[in-house]
Structures are given as structure tokens and as C-alpha cells.
Image (cartoon, rainbow, N blue to C red):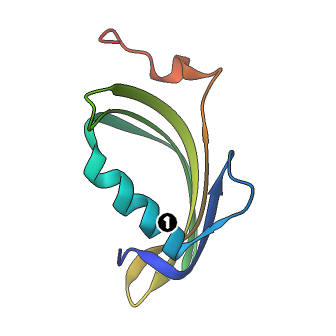
Amino acid sequence: MEFIHEDYSGWNNVESIPADKQSLVTELNFEIPIKRMEDYSIIPVKLNIHGEIAVVHYYLKNKSENNKNLLSNDARYYTDVLIKNNCRWLLFADHFGVQESRNYFFKNKSE
């Protein structure tokens, strides 16, 4: 996972402590083979770039199917902190939470 900085730290609104790069890579390597992305949309909210650092806020809605053919719909908000290293942007820190009461941002006729 070359897009993740070695000193990465991030968490969500459920975990009690932040994860490091190894924890994130382990989680992604577990989830990627058992989930198939059906559809997704990213809604950018705000982007701030200050030299070699960027802060990105966005909403992500995705529909996926797991290895038991169960569909799930998620709507989450994200904040990513990126750091530029050797002309490449790397994920340095992040936070996300699940949207519960504001899903009206993501409604469409097919759901």
C-alpha cells in the first residue's frame, strides 16, 4: 500500500484508539477480497492545500456485496490529511464516521 505514509495514523467514530499503517493495511487486505464494490459516489466538500500538506473533506456513498451475497449501503464522511513526499501525495492521517441522520445527501431514485 504505497499510497499510505509510514507514519500514518487514523481512526473512525467507533474505534477507541487510532490505527497505524500496519493495522490499516491488515484491515484493507482482509476486506478487499470479501467485498465487491457495486457502486460509489464521492462528494467533495472542501480542500485546503498548504505547501506539502493537504486536508480533504468529502462524503463517500458506496454499495457493496460481500462474499455471502449480502448487499450493504454505507454513507460516510471523511477527513484525509495528505503529505507530499517525492512528488507523490501520501495518506498521512484520516478520520471517518458513518452518516446516520443526514442520508438525504445521497438519496436517488434507484434506492
Residue denoted by label 1: 24
Pick the front one: 58 or 64: 64
- Give the residue displayed 37% in from the left and 57% down from the top: 30
Decide: is 88 above or below 48: below
Q: Quadrant of residue 111?
A: top left
| Residue 110 at x, y percent in the picture | 29, 11
Pick the front one: 84 or 12: 12
| Residue 26 at x, y percent in the picture | 44, 67
| Residue 24 at x, y percent in the picture | 49, 65
Viewed as shown, does residue 99 lie left or right of 22? right
Amino acid type of the residue that numbered disc 1 sits on in the rendered structure? Leu
Q: Circle 1: is it few (<14), some (14-19), or many (20+) Cα within 10 Å? A: some
| Residue 80 at x, y percent in the picture | 56, 60
Viewed as shown, does residue 7 lie left or right of 29? right
Pick the front one: 25 or 78: 25
Viewed as shown, does residue 45 lie left or right of 26? right
- Give the residue displayed 33% in from the left and 25% down from the top: 71
- Give the residue displayed 38% in from the left and 74% down from the top: 3
Outermost residue, right side = 16
Decide: is 86 above or below 62: below
Q: Quadrant of residue 108?
A: top left
Pick the front one: 74 or 85: 74
Outermost residue, top side = 109
Name the image quarter holding the N terminus. bottom left
Viewed as shown, does residue 32 lie left or right of 56? left
